[in-house]
Image: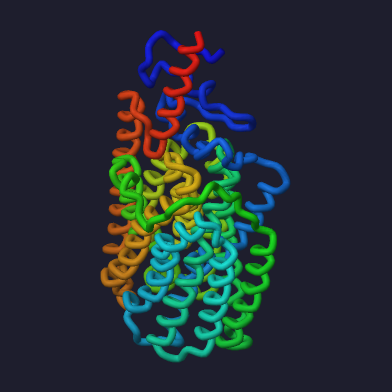
Amino acid sequence: MPTVSTSTSLGDIDIDKELRSPGEVYVAPRSTTDTENANSGVADTADAPVPPNGGVKAWTQVFGSFFLFFASWGFVNSFGVYQNYYATELLKGTPASSISWIGSVQAFLLMFIGVLTGPLYDKGYFKPLACTGTFLVVLGIMMTSISKTYWQVLLSQGICIGLGTGCLFTPSVAIIVGYFTTKRSFANGLGSTGGSIGGIVYSVAFRSMVDSIGFGWATRVLGFMTFVLVVGSISILEPLQYPSGPRSLFLPSALKDPAFTFTAIAVMTMFMGLYIPYFYIQAYAAEYIGLDKGLSYQLLTIMNVASVFGRTIPTIVADRIGPINTMIPSAAGTAVMGFAWLGMKTAPSTIVFAILYGFLSGTAVSLPPTTIASVGGKQSEMGTRLGMAFTFAATGLLTGNPIAGTLIDIPNGKFKGAQWLCGGLVAAGTALFVVAKMFMKDMVEEGKPVSGEEDRVERALDDVKFERKKE
């Protein structure tokens, strides 16, 4: 006989007992942290697959997603080396802001087309998406290798690779979200380290080969490597398929949820400023500080190495205290380091900045998917909700770096405008995360279900009424 309090208010019903089916765990929201962790594990119907939260198959999906992150975010995180090469060699004389549009368009498309790939993933089209993404990424790399002009590079590296990585990224996140609830932040953080390691491998490999075999073949070698890794990844990935129904590109119910909306806007604002150091740290070190070419190149690698630890260690904490409760201090720390960049005027201080900024920004970059998932929503709609939020984030990625480029005067070593922009935008994003958390807390205190939970609450109430009639 289910345990029911004498009051029928939402806050007094033992939803945990009323809704639990074999193998499924659901915790009724009692605090902000509990809400975040509980909502991430909600299944849509009794016959929906149960996230295993571990086991060989689940961790195999994390391993496979690692290489999708590698091939998608790896290019974004390594663009700084291309930015510097284009400015000094292939596209010499082209303004820094124009060159940054190449990387910004690539990053924008990576996240923006999630509004299309999310619903397609929810409908069960993972394999077609992954194969299309692989084809476009490899095609874009090969076309980049023979590009000679700015527009050729923009079309191949910016648009073609951007579209391909967009087909790979949203599914790589959604797969992990489907397999994990209680360990979701850690699993996603572990998979997302592929983006940092990809940034290291792509940048180091390009630098080591470009002088010996030339730009064309150095780029083509990266294309062959990407093809092998992604094809191997696709062969072992097997998404959990939740009950399918009609899908739309946008869910009006999600946009009506202030917690979801403010979280999405917060990610967008933060991403506007967060990648500025990744794009310009090498130029800053070479032109402002006067470091030699070799050491200035290493700074981007140092940032990506530190980011690996930032994407894993804090995510363990996030699974305990809630993703947004970890996101807020991580984003705040990133903002502080963005402002601290203004005072980095020597080689040692710049190296320390690269380490700390890489670590903190790594945490801030890895947590948005699980933070968005923690707001609520059905598992079968998670791809769509992620795609919607990533569309917001894409706008930030598209605009932030080119704006920073217009504030930078590389020949005269002027970077202060971009540094202020970096710190200010990430700080504004942090404030918006705080607002989103307040809305989550208000919903819990008012006894309201968060987005996507209404159907489950109704089922709980129906079950309670049925049991009382039996009594």
Q: Which of the 4 image quarters holds residue 194?
A: bottom right
Q: Is residue 259 left or right of residue 65?
A: left
| Residue drawn at point x = 53 percent, y = 54 percent | 173
Instruction: From the viewer's side, name the closer residue of 81 and 440.
Output: 440
Please tell me whether residue 462 is drawn above or below residue 101 in the rendered image. Answer: above
Instruction: From the viewer's side, name the closer residue of 409 and 288.
Output: 409
Q: Which of the 4 image quarters holds residue 98?
A: bottom left
Q: Which of the 4 image quarters holds residue 138?
A: bottom right
Give coordinates of residue 176: x percent, y percent. 57, 49
For the question of whether residue 306 can be seen, the reply is no
Q: Residue furthest front?
A: 470
Q: Is residue 144 left or right of residue 431?
A: right
Give coordinates of residue 139: x percent, y percent. 54, 81
Please tell me whether residue 45 is drawn above or below residue 381 in the rendered image. Answer: above
Q: Quadrant of the N terminus?
A: top right
| Residue drawn at point x = 45 percent, y = 87 percent | 90
| Residue drawn at point x = 40 percent, y = 81 percent | 154
| Residue drawn at point x = 66 percent, y = 63 percent | 233
Colouring scheme applied when the structure was drawn: rainbow
Please tell me whether residue 444 is drawn above or below residue 467 in the rendered image. Answer: below
